Image (tube, coloured by chain):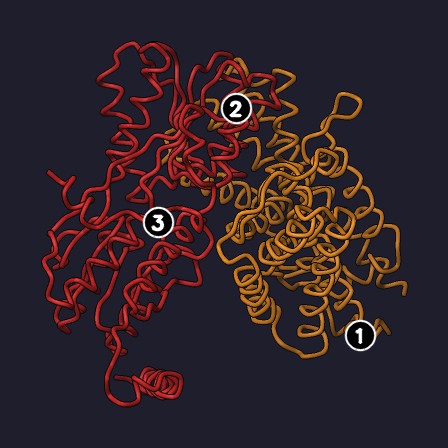
Chain colours: A orange, B red
Amino acid sequence: MHSINKTHLLKYSKENFFILSRILSILILIIFLSIVSPQFLGWNNILNIFRQASIQFLISAGLTLVIITAGIDLAVGAILGLAACLSASLIVSGHLGLGIVAGLISGLFAGALNGLLVAFGRITPFIATYGVLWIAGGIGYVFMKGEVLHSFPPGFRFIGTGILFGIPVTILIAGIILVILHLLLHKTVFGRYIYAIGGNPIAARLSGISVKSKLFYVYTLSGLLSSFAALVIMARVNSVDSSIGEELLLPAIAAVCLGGASLFGGVGGIAGTAIGALILALVINGMNLLGVPSFWQSGVMGAIILGAVLADQYGSGRSLIKS
Amino acid sequence: MDRRNFIKYNIIVTLGGLANPIFAQGNKPITIAFFVKNVTNPFWKGCRIGAEKAAKELGVSLEVVAPTKPDNIEEQTRLVEDWIVKKPDAFVFVPVDFKALVPSIQKVNKAGIPVVGYNNRMTDVDFVSYIGSDDELIEYEASTFLFKSMGGKGKIVHIDGVPAASTAQARKKGLERALKDFPGIELLVSQPGQYRRLPAVQVFENLMQRYPEIDGVVSANDDMAVGIAEALISAGRANKTKVIGVDGIPDALAAISAGKMFATADFSGHDQAYLAVHAAVRNLRKLPVPKEIKLPIVIISKQNISSFPSTPEERSVPSWDKTIASQK
């Protein structure tokens, strides 16, 4: 137990280093953008950036936990899409509560399937979740048959478009999830186990952690969080088609990695992911405000992601690779 | 024929034989392989329903072929190869990319299976007939309609599709052509919305910060246009900005009825697909088929929306003879 606490502390201080370096890069971005674009520092624009970052954060939150265990969940977007399809179809037919519950349960089950395959089926996370990606996506296609569901009730849309105490509700929701997951990772035994498993699964097993059940819970939680993100996105865009979850995966991985998590596991944190999501939102906002031509945007985005990760490698004495 | 295709082929022939007594007796009914770009966008659902109506009317069997990953070039290439092996009587085809699929369709030509194209034109291939309208023209007419309603002056924003997609490029060209006709219209900026609602909404929210006055928005499709219209409402700017889209999807028609969105341009995938299946069957039955059928573009706005059924199922089918007569 003692050794686990010690490694955990070590990881924690490393996480703090990442957060500091990220806050620095955010400051640089903010200074640059506020010089070149006069509208950048407007209150509405700031809310805008935070709201967009909140959505990105919600999509990436579950994935962060999985990546800390040295796994990967390729099905985040697909599970999100499936949950959106199921709950939208119930919501437009008038069953609001049932729709929300069904969406969350579908995410929970799809996540549990990932967990079963990875923890008990001993399939590599990459392959297991890739399979679930296709299954969840396929069910969504069959279910929707090219239909688009739209116009959800205003009460439901509140979570995506509402404003409470002058702040968009989406930002408040993301803030609450951030706090809960941060406490889960750093103040509970379960959280410590997640880092221990990611850092060294064999040592974790030898020190008496039931690695399988913990992994199962992490993937299940990731599925649940994806379906929760689905509800917020639905409320925001007011329409669902079966492709709603596509192309969300890669930005989600980018946000987690920008937040300092290592794909080798054991390193990272949920606050880092929130910062990663914020960086992505800042860059897109900046490019839109500056009117960067369409064709350049993906290149700029890639360069910034690589630049940030490279800066870490050198800034932290390449500790990422060695650990 | 590799082994996988061979097995698939046999399964299909056997099942076809079991299911259809006429087939088993060797009196083979006409089978048409009907391609769409994806099963997610309602535009292609409209196409499928148009094609199904034609197939039912003509008594032919229709196999709908779609990539599971939307607009996936590699997957459609494979599907075409599979279908060459299955040898349907004709292909009714739309390429997910008008350049990348050229070698595949050349193979179909070589295999002697007649191909009718619809919706996206292709070069260097042999089409029995092409039914469609082009993307450049539709955006040109949509933009022109918007600019006229703005009195020929004002500031607009363009929300592009997937910048590399051929449809997005053609639509952008149409917009640029319309801008030349209206020197009083200023294009503030063109930014990509990826043809999808969430990115389009977010990009547009960012642009609203930079541009306090936007008189019009030209959106490369309806899915994005509806999201933009909603974003304008949330920002309290709905009455100042007119949004126009392309496709005529049900969601957009609802938004136009409700006064949220200004207009959309429809090149009716439903009618294109219906006529394309007709052309394919006429060709097989040795009836004359024109090399190209151009469908008129219809602008749907609040004035004429009542005459457009909101779902493709309720739409009436075009008359072949009347369409041909109108081609002069």
Q: Is residue B281 left or right of residue B43?
A: left
Residue A222 placement (x, y as % from top left): 71, 57
Measured along the vertical axis of the image, is residue A203 above or below residue A90?
Answer: below
- Residue type indicated by callout 3: His
Mark 1: give few (<14), some (14-19) or many (20+) Cα within 10 Å. some
Instruction: Residue at 35%, 49% (x, y): give it.
Output: B270
Residue linked to disc 1: A205
Q: Chain of mark 1?
A: A
Q: Nearer the viewer, residue A79 or A248?
A: A79
Label 2: chain letter: B
Q: Specify few, some or many for label 3: CA neighbours under 10 Å numbering under 14, 14-19, or 20 or more.
A: many
Q: As drawn, is B2 to the left or to the right of A201?
A: left
Residue A94 percent across, percent down from the top left: 72, 46
Mark before the other along the chain sequence, 3 or 2: 2
On the image, numbered disc 2 is attached to which residue?
Answer: B259
Disc 3 is placed on an element classified as: helix
Name the residue beneath numbered marker 3: B270
Residue closest to the eye, A19 or B284:
B284
Q: Mark 1 falls on what kind of element?
A: helix
Circle 2 residues within 10 Å: few <14, some 14–19, many ≥20: some
- Percent coordinates x, y for residue B189 in the rendering: 39, 22
Which quadrant of the figure contains the C terminus of chain B? top left
Marks 1 and 3: which is nearer the front?
3
Describe the element under mark 2 as helix, strand or loop. loop
| Residue B4 appears in the rendering | no
Disc 1 and disc 3 in contact, CB within 8 angstroms: no
